[in-house]
Image (cartoon, rainbow, N blue to C red):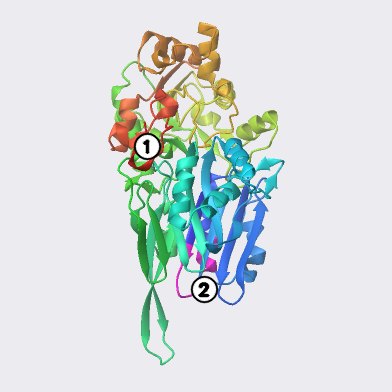
Amino acid sequence: MGGFFGTISKQDCVNDLFYGTDYNSHLGTKRAGLVTFDKESGFHRSIHSLERNYFRSRFEDELDQFKGHQGLGVISDTDPQPIIVNSHLGRYAVVTVAKINNLREIADELMQQRMHLSEMSANNINQTELVALLINMGDTFVEGINLVYQKIEGSCSMLILTEDGIIAARDFLGRTPIVIGQKQLHRLSPIGTDEFLQAYAVSSETTSFPNLDYKIVRDLGPGEIVRLRADGIEVMQKPFTRCQICSFLWVYYGFPASDYQGINTEFVRERNGRLMGEKDTGIEADLVCGIPDSGVGMALGYSEGKKVPYKRAVLKYTPTWPRSFTPGNQNRRDLVAKMKLIPNPAILKDQRIVFCDDSIVRGTQLRDNVRTFFENGAKEVHVRISCPPLVYGCPFIGFTSSKSDMELITRRIIKDFEGDDKKNLDKYAKTDSPEYQRMVNEIARRLGLTSVKFASIEDLVKSIGLPKEGVCTHCFDGSSYCHARHGEEWFT
């Protein structure tokens, strides 16, 4: 997916920028970048790969090179960024959290207008540069950002560092979050009196705020555009009326301490697990365990709802596996996933265990984990998943490395059943339909599970606490695909 962080004040911002960006590291594993602006020295930028190293280790030694009272940082799962641009709008830097499905079509259209793309990575178009080119086609930043909204199929949120503050623009349907934070700074004035100044931050994750003393001000609305200066916030475009924030924020890639739309991630996971535990009357279990990390919150709730003790039957080896790097080779990725989790035979032996996890994508990791649990003495292995089956590929958020819908275990099963992986998808996506139940039973068989159950879409939405139409559930039921983008009609 990716995440970003920006900050602006009347004091040096580099430390806040460095640590605030670091708190978005769980959102991406490919690249990271920092850029600052100083009135005397201008823009300073650095980009590094994260595929073999952590954010802090890549940037810490060069922090003294950054200067200024405002800056942006990005953790990217796509292209190298920030991009620095010279244009009729002035000089600026831009970072994006985006998935643009019609990248090539837009690029071809721009080429026909004699506009050229120079930032290429592995012969791929840099989508952040493409966003910048579209922005430059507007007479103002607001006009250019709206052109981005009109042209792209997918989603795009962005931060723009200008010589006159930071512009933040949230995706036109709000699929990815942007949250504003504020803190008070204290300093002595030149005449020795106390001065109290404001500093602002803007981030994908509210987790970035507490340790840097920022307090949440508010979320940007869908399509909203604001400019942050050291002395305040200017609304450049009011939010649109419809929001479809990605429900997978609360299921998987959101950090437990983060809030989106004012709703805490861990709270949603525990409530979702509690609902499932209360309803799950068909099995007897001796203990509940969460698959680290994103399955833990659900497991705590399930334990409470089912009235079964929570125990750590499998642990994540945090000294060397605090996060999952993503080797290009699939076999190596599978090995990485296995290496970071260590079963505890003393807890597993002769027990009927419910393991809670966030989702099943390919099923490879879970199948290997389940085999290990049985090898270490488990009597029964039941799996409970905090979201419905992933039946549709996501056209909006890159939350997996899947290149094709056929990488989803559900679609491979549907193809085996129907001879066509696209046939009767609506029936397989409907909770407790005959097709749904047949598919779920087959998932359990293929993965070697005693049983498997998925949260219903109704319970997931209830746990989040927003109206169904306010969250995107496309990957579960195919309901949210958006084509039309024009004014207040930027949705179907």
Which residue type does callout 2 highlight? Asp
Between 492 and 364, the one nearer to me in the picture: 492
Taking 86 as reference, is 198 above or below it? below
Question: Is 277 on the left or on the right of 441, as rendered?
Answer: left
Which residue position is annotated with label 1? 269
- Residue at (41% x, 87% y) in the render: 189
Residue 304 seen in render: no
User: Looking at the picture, how far across and down is residue 114, in whole percent?
Assistant: 65, 47
Span shown in magenta = 7-18
Question: Where does the C terminus fall, quadrant-wise?
Answer: top left
User: Looking at the picture, how far across and down is residue 208, in whole percent?
Assistant: 45, 56
Taking 396 as reference, is 393 above or below it? above
Crowding near the residue tagged with mark 2, few <14, some 14–19, many ≥20 C-alpha atoms within 10 Å: some
Between 321 and 376, the one nearer to me in the picture: 321
User: Looking at the picture, how far across and down is residue 176, in whole percent?
Assistant: 44, 44
Q: Any magenta on residue 17?
A: yes
Crowding near the residue tagged with mark 1, few <14, some 14–19, many ≥20 C-alpha atoms within 10 Å: many
Camera-near label (2 vs 1) is 2
- Which quadrant of the figure has residue 136? bottom right
Assign a secondary structure to mark 2.
Answer: loop
- Residue at (41% x, 51% y) in the render: 178
Between 330 and 38, the one nearer to me in the picture: 38
Taking 210 as reference, is 155 above or below it? above
The residue at the far front in this view is: 113
Which residue type does callout 1 highlight? Arg
Numbered mark located on residue 12 in the image: 2
First-in-chain label (2 vs 1) = 2
Between 234 and 343, the one nearer to me in the picture: 234
Residue 101 seen in render: yes
Q: Any magenta on residue 116?
A: no
User: Looking at the picture, how far across and down is residue 86, in whole percent?
Assistant: 60, 62
